[in-house]
Image (cartoon, rainbow, N blue to C red):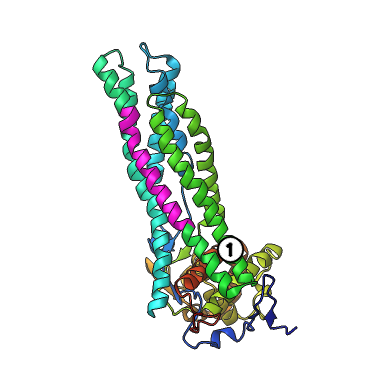
Amino acid sequence: MDANVAPNHAGDTMIEAVPEAMLPDSHPGRAGIQGNPTVTLVKDRGRFGPVPGSRLVNNLSWAVGFMELANAGDFAANVWNDVPVPAVAVVFMARRLQTAERARRLLRAGPVLDMDVYMAVTLRELGSEVSARWFMDLLLGCGAVLIAAGTYMAIAGANGGVWLASNILSGYLGNAPVVLYGLVSFAWALYIFCKAQGHVTATRKVLRGSRAAALVKRRSRHVQVFCVINGTATVLGGVGSMMTATMWWGYVVLVPVIASSLFCNVWWRRRVGYTRSAPDDFPPLDPSCLVRDLEFAARAEVTIREHRTSPMRQFVADPSSLPDVLAFLQQHGLLDLYCLKIISTDALCSALGGNQSDEVNLGVDGLLAVPEPLHARLLEAAQECLGEFGLEHFKNRERYTAELLGTYYTIASNVDFYGNMTQEK
Protein backbone atom coordinates (compact mmCIF):
# COMPACT_ATOMS: atom_id res chain seq x y z
CA MET A 1 0.00 0.00 0.00
CA ASP A 2 1.24 3.45 -0.85
CA ALA A 3 2.59 5.33 2.15
CA ASN A 4 0.62 8.42 1.24
CA VAL A 5 -2.75 6.70 1.32
CA ALA A 6 -4.62 6.32 4.59
CA PRO A 7 -6.55 3.04 4.90
CA ASN A 8 -10.30 3.20 5.36
CA HIS A 9 -11.15 1.13 8.42
CA ALA A 10 -14.86 1.62 8.05
CA GLY A 11 -15.73 0.84 4.47
CA ASP A 12 -15.15 1.38 0.84
CA THR A 13 -13.20 4.58 0.22
CA MET A 14 -9.64 5.68 0.65
CA ILE A 15 -8.34 9.11 1.62
CA GLU A 16 -5.10 10.26 0.12
CA ALA A 17 -2.87 11.74 2.81
CA VAL A 18 -0.96 14.66 1.34
CA PRO A 19 2.54 15.22 2.76
CA GLU A 20 2.44 18.06 5.26
CA ALA A 21 5.09 20.07 3.41
CA MET A 22 2.85 20.17 0.31
CA LEU A 23 -0.43 21.07 2.00
CA PRO A 24 0.05 24.86 2.21
CA ASP A 25 0.58 25.00 -1.57
CA SER A 26 -2.38 22.83 -2.50
CA HIS A 27 -4.60 25.91 -2.81
CA PRO A 28 -2.60 29.15 -3.00
CA GLY A 29 -4.14 31.82 -0.83
CA ARG A 30 -6.09 29.33 1.25
CA ALA A 31 -5.08 28.17 4.68
CA GLY A 32 -6.07 26.62 7.95
CA ILE A 33 -5.90 28.44 11.28
CA GLN A 34 -3.10 30.98 11.29
CA GLY A 35 -1.81 32.85 14.31
CA ASN A 36 -1.96 36.64 14.30
CA PRO A 37 1.21 38.18 12.81
CA THR A 38 1.37 40.87 15.49
CA VAL A 39 0.41 40.99 19.15
CA THR A 40 -0.82 44.10 20.96
CA LEU A 41 -0.26 44.25 24.71
CA VAL A 42 -1.47 46.96 27.07
CA LYS A 43 -0.23 47.81 30.54
CA ASP A 44 -2.72 47.59 33.39
CA ARG A 45 -1.65 48.16 36.99
CA GLY A 46 1.99 47.90 36.04
CA ARG A 47 1.71 44.63 34.10
CA PHE A 48 1.24 43.96 30.40
CA GLY A 49 -1.66 41.83 29.24
CA PRO A 50 -3.82 41.21 26.17
CA VAL A 51 -6.17 43.90 24.94
CA PRO A 52 -9.48 43.43 26.80
CA GLY A 53 -11.94 41.46 24.69
CA SER A 54 -9.28 40.10 22.34
CA ARG A 55 -9.58 36.51 23.56
CA LEU A 56 -12.39 34.02 24.04
CA VAL A 57 -11.41 32.48 27.37
CA ASN A 58 -12.54 29.11 28.75
CA ASN A 59 -13.06 30.42 32.27
CA LEU A 60 -16.55 29.27 33.21
CA SER A 61 -16.84 30.12 36.89
CA TRP A 62 -16.98 27.33 39.46
CA ALA A 63 -19.94 29.21 40.95
CA VAL A 64 -22.07 28.11 37.99
CA GLY A 65 -21.75 24.52 39.14
CA PHE A 66 -23.19 25.45 42.52
CA MET A 67 -26.15 27.47 41.26
CA GLU A 68 -28.57 24.56 41.64
CA LEU A 69 -27.24 23.98 45.15
CA ALA A 70 -27.88 27.63 45.92
CA ASN A 71 -31.35 27.27 44.42
CA ALA A 72 -32.13 24.54 46.94
CA GLY A 73 -31.09 26.82 49.77
CA ASP A 74 -34.66 28.04 50.28
CA PHE A 75 -35.36 24.65 51.85
CA ALA A 76 -35.57 26.37 55.21
CA ALA A 77 -38.16 28.94 54.16
CA ASN A 78 -40.44 26.43 52.42
CA VAL A 79 -40.18 23.43 54.74
CA TRP A 80 -39.71 25.07 58.14
CA ASN A 81 -41.95 28.09 57.64
CA ASP A 82 -43.20 27.90 61.23
CA VAL A 83 -43.63 30.37 64.07
CA PRO A 84 -41.48 30.72 65.99
CA VAL A 85 -38.77 30.12 63.40
CA PRO A 86 -36.45 27.25 64.43
CA ALA A 87 -32.84 28.27 64.97
CA VAL A 88 -31.66 25.78 62.34
CA ALA A 89 -33.95 27.48 59.81
CA VAL A 90 -32.31 30.84 60.46
CA VAL A 91 -28.92 29.26 59.76
CA PHE A 92 -30.13 27.73 56.49
CA MET A 93 -31.68 31.01 55.35
CA ALA A 94 -28.55 32.98 56.14
CA ARG A 95 -26.41 30.52 54.20
CA ARG A 96 -28.83 30.69 51.28
CA LEU A 97 -28.52 34.46 51.11
CA GLN A 98 -24.73 34.35 51.39
CA THR A 99 -24.43 31.73 48.64
CA ALA A 100 -26.73 33.63 46.29
CA GLU A 101 -24.85 36.88 46.83
CA ARG A 102 -21.47 35.21 46.35
CA ALA A 103 -22.67 33.52 43.15
CA ARG A 104 -24.03 36.82 41.84
CA ARG A 105 -20.68 38.55 42.37
CA LEU A 106 -18.72 35.73 40.75
CA LEU A 107 -20.99 35.58 37.69
CA ARG A 108 -20.87 39.33 37.00
CA ALA A 109 -17.91 38.54 35.85
CA GLY A 110 -13.63 36.01 2.88
CA PRO A 111 -15.55 33.91 0.48
CA VAL A 112 -19.19 33.42 1.42
CA LEU A 113 -18.68 29.77 2.41
CA ASP A 114 -15.72 30.58 4.65
CA MET A 115 -17.54 33.47 6.30
CA ASP A 116 -20.58 31.24 6.84
CA VAL A 117 -18.31 28.78 8.66
CA TYR A 118 -16.75 31.47 10.83
CA MET A 119 -20.15 32.98 11.60
CA ALA A 120 -21.70 29.61 12.48
CA VAL A 121 -18.89 28.81 14.92
CA THR A 122 -19.01 32.32 16.39
CA LEU A 123 -22.79 32.04 16.81
CA ARG A 124 -22.42 28.87 18.87
CA GLU A 125 -19.64 30.43 20.93
CA LEU A 126 -21.74 33.52 21.57
CA GLY A 127 -24.85 31.49 22.34
CA SER A 128 -22.99 29.34 24.84
CA GLU A 129 -21.49 32.39 26.52
CA VAL A 130 -24.88 34.13 26.71
CA SER A 131 -26.59 31.01 28.05
CA ALA A 132 -23.94 30.14 30.63
CA ARG A 133 -23.23 33.67 31.83
CA TRP A 134 -25.55 36.56 30.89
CA PHE A 135 -28.86 34.68 30.68
CA MET A 136 -28.13 32.64 33.79
CA ASP A 137 -27.08 35.73 35.70
CA LEU A 138 -30.20 37.61 34.59
CA LEU A 139 -32.84 34.94 35.25
CA LEU A 140 -31.33 33.16 38.22
CA GLY A 141 -30.28 36.51 39.65
CA CYS A 142 -33.86 37.80 39.47
CA GLY A 143 -35.10 34.56 40.98
CA ALA A 144 -32.52 34.80 43.74
CA VAL A 145 -33.69 38.32 44.64
CA LEU A 146 -37.34 37.22 44.85
CA ILE A 147 -36.54 34.06 46.81
CA ALA A 148 -34.23 35.99 49.14
CA ALA A 149 -37.00 38.52 49.83
CA GLY A 150 -39.42 35.70 50.58
CA THR A 151 -36.85 34.01 52.79
CA TYR A 152 -36.39 37.19 54.83
CA MET A 153 -40.14 37.65 55.13
CA ALA A 154 -40.54 34.08 56.43
CA ILE A 155 -38.86 35.21 59.64
CA ALA A 156 -41.96 37.34 60.35
CA GLY A 157 -44.36 34.59 59.30
CA ALA A 158 -46.65 35.15 62.29
CA ASN A 159 -48.43 37.80 60.21
CA GLY A 160 -50.83 36.10 57.80
CA GLY A 161 -50.26 38.53 54.94
CA VAL A 162 -46.50 38.35 55.32
CA TRP A 163 -46.66 34.56 55.50
CA LEU A 164 -48.62 34.39 52.22
CA ALA A 165 -46.31 36.85 50.46
CA SER A 166 -43.29 34.90 51.71
CA ASN A 167 -44.62 31.66 50.27
CA ILE A 168 -45.37 33.29 46.92
CA LEU A 169 -41.98 34.99 46.62
CA SER A 170 -39.91 32.01 47.73
CA GLY A 171 -42.19 29.60 45.89
CA TYR A 172 -43.87 29.89 42.51
CA LEU A 173 -42.96 33.49 41.68
CA GLY A 174 -39.33 33.29 42.76
CA ASN A 175 -38.76 29.99 40.97
CA ALA A 176 -40.48 31.04 37.72
CA PRO A 177 -37.23 32.53 36.28
CA VAL A 178 -35.49 29.23 37.09
CA VAL A 179 -38.09 27.37 35.04
CA LEU A 180 -37.70 29.82 32.15
CA TYR A 181 -33.92 29.41 32.24
CA GLY A 182 -34.35 25.63 32.23
CA LEU A 183 -36.53 25.75 29.11
CA VAL A 184 -34.20 28.10 27.24
CA SER A 185 -31.14 26.08 28.26
CA PHE A 186 -32.80 22.85 27.15
CA ALA A 187 -33.70 24.34 23.75
CA TRP A 188 -30.13 25.57 23.25
CA ALA A 189 -28.70 22.20 24.33
CA LEU A 190 -30.96 20.41 21.83
CA TYR A 191 -29.80 22.76 19.05
CA ILE A 192 -26.12 22.20 19.86
CA PHE A 193 -26.64 18.43 20.15
CA CYS A 194 -28.09 18.28 16.63
CA LYS A 195 -25.30 20.46 15.24
CA ALA A 196 -22.66 18.20 16.80
CA GLN A 197 -24.30 15.13 15.27
CA GLY A 198 -24.28 16.92 11.92
CA HIS A 199 -20.52 17.40 12.26
CA VAL A 200 -20.02 13.67 12.78
CA THR A 201 -22.15 12.75 9.77
CA ALA A 202 -20.62 15.35 7.43
CA THR A 203 -16.98 14.57 8.22
CA ARG A 204 -17.55 10.82 8.11
CA LYS A 205 -18.93 11.22 4.59
CA VAL A 206 -15.72 12.83 3.29
CA LEU A 207 -12.99 11.71 5.71
CA ARG A 208 -14.20 8.20 6.51
CA GLY A 209 -11.53 6.22 8.37
CA SER A 210 -9.19 9.19 8.90
CA ARG A 211 -7.70 10.45 12.13
CA ALA A 212 -9.35 13.84 11.60
CA ALA A 213 -12.82 12.28 11.37
CA ALA A 214 -12.17 10.42 14.63
CA LEU A 215 -11.09 13.66 16.32
CA VAL A 216 -14.20 15.51 15.14
CA LYS A 217 -16.34 12.62 16.36
CA ARG A 218 -14.65 12.66 19.77
CA ARG A 219 -15.15 16.41 20.05
CA SER A 220 -18.81 16.09 19.04
CA ARG A 221 -19.47 13.29 21.54
CA HIS A 222 -17.98 15.39 24.35
CA VAL A 223 -20.29 18.25 23.37
CA GLN A 224 -23.29 15.92 23.21
CA VAL A 225 -22.61 14.47 26.65
CA PHE A 226 -22.64 18.01 28.03
CA CYS A 227 -25.85 18.87 26.16
CA VAL A 228 -27.74 15.78 27.31
CA ILE A 229 -26.83 16.10 30.98
CA ASN A 230 -27.00 19.88 31.21
CA GLY A 231 -30.21 20.20 29.20
CA THR A 232 -31.96 17.52 31.22
CA ALA A 233 -30.67 18.89 34.52
CA THR A 234 -31.85 22.44 33.88
CA VAL A 235 -35.38 21.27 33.03
CA LEU A 236 -35.53 18.99 36.08
CA GLY A 237 -34.12 21.82 38.17
CA GLY A 238 -36.95 24.09 37.06
CA VAL A 239 -39.60 21.44 37.75
CA GLY A 240 -38.08 20.57 41.12
CA SER A 241 -37.91 24.25 42.06
CA MET A 242 -41.61 24.72 41.40
CA MET A 243 -42.43 21.59 43.40
CA THR A 244 -40.52 22.84 46.43
CA ALA A 245 -43.03 25.64 46.90
CA THR A 246 -45.61 23.19 48.28
CA MET A 247 -43.93 19.76 48.44
CA TRP A 248 -40.82 19.16 50.51
CA TRP A 249 -39.81 16.14 48.46
CA GLY A 250 -39.25 18.46 45.52
CA TYR A 251 -35.82 18.94 47.06
CA VAL A 252 -35.16 15.24 46.48
CA VAL A 253 -35.52 15.94 42.76
CA LEU A 254 -32.89 18.66 43.07
CA VAL A 255 -30.26 16.28 44.50
CA PRO A 256 -29.30 14.68 41.13
CA VAL A 257 -29.68 18.09 39.49
CA ILE A 258 -27.07 19.54 41.86
CA ALA A 259 -24.70 16.63 41.18
CA SER A 260 -25.13 16.90 37.41
CA SER A 261 -24.55 20.67 37.51
CA LEU A 262 -21.20 20.14 39.20
CA PHE A 263 -20.33 17.42 36.67
CA CYS A 264 -21.26 19.64 33.72
CA ASN A 265 -19.15 22.48 35.07
CA VAL A 266 -16.06 20.27 35.25
CA TRP A 267 -16.85 18.56 31.92
CA TRP A 268 -17.15 21.91 30.12
CA ARG A 269 -13.88 23.21 31.50
CA ARG A 270 -11.90 20.05 30.73
CA ARG A 271 -13.53 18.57 27.61
CA VAL A 272 -15.65 21.12 25.77
CA GLY A 273 -14.67 24.77 26.29
CA TYR A 274 -11.64 26.34 24.66
CA THR A 275 -9.61 29.53 24.72
CA ARG A 276 -8.64 31.27 21.50
CA SER A 277 -7.45 34.66 20.33
CA ALA A 278 -9.67 36.80 18.15
CA PRO A 279 -8.10 36.78 14.65
CA ASP A 280 -6.98 40.01 13.00
CA ASP A 281 -8.73 38.81 9.85
CA PHE A 282 -10.52 35.72 8.57
CA PRO A 283 -8.33 33.90 6.05
CA PRO A 284 -9.94 31.64 3.44
CA LEU A 285 -10.33 28.08 4.69
CA ASP A 286 -8.90 24.99 3.03
CA PRO A 287 -10.32 21.77 4.53
CA SER A 288 -7.11 19.86 3.79
CA CYS A 289 -5.20 22.43 5.85
CA LEU A 290 -7.78 22.19 8.63
CA VAL A 291 -7.28 18.42 8.62
CA ARG A 292 -3.54 18.93 8.86
CA ASP A 293 -3.86 21.48 11.67
CA LEU A 294 -6.29 19.27 13.60
CA GLU A 295 -4.11 16.17 13.40
CA PHE A 296 -1.00 18.20 14.19
CA ALA A 297 -2.62 19.68 17.31
CA ALA A 298 -3.57 16.20 18.53
CA ARG A 299 -0.03 14.92 17.95
CA ALA A 300 1.48 18.00 19.56
CA GLU A 301 -0.40 17.35 22.80
CA VAL A 302 1.16 13.90 23.07
CA THR A 303 4.60 15.14 22.06
CA ILE A 304 4.68 17.95 24.61
CA ARG A 305 3.42 15.64 27.34
CA GLU A 306 6.32 13.27 26.60
CA HIS A 307 8.99 16.01 26.28
CA ARG A 308 8.04 18.70 28.80
CA THR A 309 11.61 19.84 29.45
CA SER A 310 12.68 20.50 25.83
CA PRO A 311 9.68 20.24 23.52
CA MET A 312 10.86 22.76 20.91
CA ARG A 313 13.41 20.42 19.33
CA GLN A 314 10.55 18.01 18.56
CA PHE A 315 8.91 20.61 16.29
CA VAL A 316 11.72 22.76 14.88
CA ALA A 317 14.60 21.23 12.95
CA ASP A 318 17.04 23.84 14.30
CA PRO A 319 15.84 25.00 17.75
CA SER A 320 18.82 27.38 17.93
CA SER A 321 17.50 29.39 14.96
CA LEU A 322 15.44 32.30 16.25
CA PRO A 323 13.67 32.91 12.89
CA ASP A 324 12.60 29.25 12.71
CA VAL A 325 11.40 29.21 16.30
CA LEU A 326 9.42 32.44 15.93
CA ALA A 327 7.91 31.21 12.66
CA PHE A 328 6.71 28.07 14.44
CA LEU A 329 5.18 30.07 17.30
CA GLN A 330 3.42 32.42 14.89
CA GLN A 331 2.14 29.65 12.62
CA HIS A 332 0.56 27.73 15.49
CA GLY A 333 -0.94 30.67 17.38
CA LEU A 334 1.54 30.73 20.27
CA LEU A 335 2.98 34.16 19.56
CA ASP A 336 0.63 36.00 21.93
CA LEU A 337 1.48 33.72 24.86
CA TYR A 338 5.16 34.02 24.01
CA CYS A 339 5.01 37.82 23.91
CA LEU A 340 3.27 37.90 27.29
CA LYS A 341 6.09 35.82 28.71
CA ILE A 342 9.00 37.82 27.32
CA ILE A 343 7.45 41.21 28.14
CA SER A 344 7.45 40.19 31.80
CA THR A 345 11.27 39.88 31.69
CA ASP A 346 12.93 43.19 32.59
CA ALA A 347 15.77 43.03 30.06
CA LEU A 348 13.52 41.98 27.18
CA CYS A 349 10.79 44.40 28.21
CA SER A 350 13.26 47.27 28.00
CA ALA A 351 14.60 46.10 24.63
CA LEU A 352 11.06 45.89 23.24
CA GLY A 353 10.11 49.38 24.42
CA GLY A 354 7.81 48.26 27.20
CA ASN A 355 9.34 50.69 29.70
CA GLN A 356 8.56 53.71 27.54
CA SER A 357 4.94 52.99 26.66
CA ASP A 358 1.73 51.55 28.07
CA GLU A 359 1.03 49.75 24.79
CA VAL A 360 3.37 47.70 22.62
CA ASN A 361 2.88 45.98 19.27
CA LEU A 362 5.09 42.96 18.84
CA GLY A 363 5.68 40.87 15.73
CA VAL A 364 8.26 38.47 14.36
CA ASP A 365 10.20 41.26 12.62
CA GLY A 366 10.34 43.32 15.80
CA LEU A 367 11.53 40.35 17.86
CA LEU A 368 14.25 39.57 15.33
CA ALA A 369 15.44 43.18 15.65
CA VAL A 370 16.22 42.68 19.34
CA PRO A 371 19.98 42.98 20.02
CA GLU A 372 21.75 39.69 19.31
CA PRO A 373 23.04 39.21 22.89
CA LEU A 374 19.40 38.76 23.93
CA HIS A 375 18.61 36.12 21.29
CA ALA A 376 19.62 33.32 23.63
CA ARG A 377 17.12 34.61 26.19
CA LEU A 378 14.43 34.76 23.52
CA LEU A 379 15.10 31.14 22.57
CA GLU A 380 15.07 30.08 26.20
CA ALA A 381 11.74 31.86 26.72
CA ALA A 382 10.31 30.08 23.67
CA GLN A 383 11.29 26.71 25.14
CA GLU A 384 9.73 27.65 28.47
CA CYS A 385 6.58 28.98 26.81
CA LEU A 386 6.00 25.79 24.83
CA GLY A 387 6.61 23.61 27.88
CA GLU A 388 4.43 25.72 30.17
CA PHE A 389 1.51 26.61 27.89
CA GLY A 390 1.86 24.29 24.90
CA LEU A 391 -0.17 21.36 26.20
CA GLU A 392 -3.21 23.45 27.10
CA HIS A 393 -2.82 25.58 23.97
CA PHE A 394 -2.91 22.64 21.58
CA LYS A 395 -5.87 21.13 23.45
CA ASN A 396 -7.74 24.38 22.84
CA ARG A 397 -6.53 24.50 19.25
CA GLU A 398 -7.67 20.93 18.61
CA ARG A 399 -11.17 21.67 19.92
CA TYR A 400 -11.52 24.87 17.91
CA THR A 401 -10.15 23.31 14.72
CA ALA A 402 -12.47 20.31 15.08
CA GLU A 403 -15.34 22.78 15.42
CA LEU A 404 -14.27 24.60 12.26
CA LEU A 405 -13.75 21.41 10.24
CA GLY A 406 -17.06 19.88 11.29
CA THR A 407 -18.87 23.12 10.51
CA TYR A 408 -17.15 23.44 7.13
CA TYR A 409 -18.27 20.03 5.89
CA THR A 410 -21.73 20.48 7.39
CA ILE A 411 -22.33 23.73 5.49
CA ALA A 412 -20.45 22.71 2.32
CA SER A 413 -21.92 19.26 1.88
CA ASN A 414 -20.66 18.88 -1.69
CA VAL A 415 -16.91 19.48 -1.37
CA ASP A 416 -14.10 16.95 -1.21
CA PHE A 417 -11.00 16.65 0.95
CA TYR A 418 -9.30 19.54 -0.90
CA GLY A 419 -12.31 21.85 -0.91
CA ASN A 420 -13.18 21.20 -4.56
CA MET A 421 -16.85 21.09 -5.54
CA THR A 422 -18.16 17.61 -6.32
CA GLN A 423 -21.23 16.40 -8.16
CA GLU A 424 -23.97 15.24 -5.80
CA LYS A 425 -25.23 11.77 -6.52
403 or 392: nearer the eye?
Answer: 403
Is 338 a magenta residue?
no
24 relative position to 412: left or right: right
Residue range (magenta)? 169-193
Residue type pointed to by label 1: Lys
Residue 227 x, y percent position in the rendering:
49, 51
Report which quarter residue 402 is drawn in.
bottom right
Is 190 a magenta residue?
yes
Q: Can residue 109 be seen by looking at this rendering?
A: no
| Picture mark count | 1
Residue 84 x, y percent position in the rendering:
36, 11
Residue 70 x, y percent position in the rendering:
44, 34
Residue drawn at (66%, 76%) of the image: 12
In this view, which residue lies farthest toward the top? 84
102 relative position to 384: left or right: left
Secondary structure of the residue carrying numbered label 1: helix
* Up/down of 213 relative to 168, above or below: below
Report which quarter residue 308 is drawn in.
bottom right
- Label 1, residues with CA under 10 Å away: few <14, some 14-19, many ≥20: many
198 relative position to 132: left or right: right
In this view, which residue lies farthest toward the left? 161
Q: What residue is shown with label 1? A: 217
315 or 164: nearer the eye?
Answer: 164
In this view, which residue lies farthest toward the front? 425
Report which quarter residue 306 is drawn in.
bottom right
Instruction: Label the magenta part by its dominant secondary structure.
Output: helix
In this view, which residue lies farthest toward the right? 1
Residue drawn at (26%, 14%) of the image: 159
Q: Can residue 87 be seen by looking at this rendering?
A: yes
* Up/down of 387 relative to 59, above or below: below
User: Which quadrant, please, contains the N terminus?
Assistant: bottom right
Residue 274 x, y percent position in the rendering:
50, 60
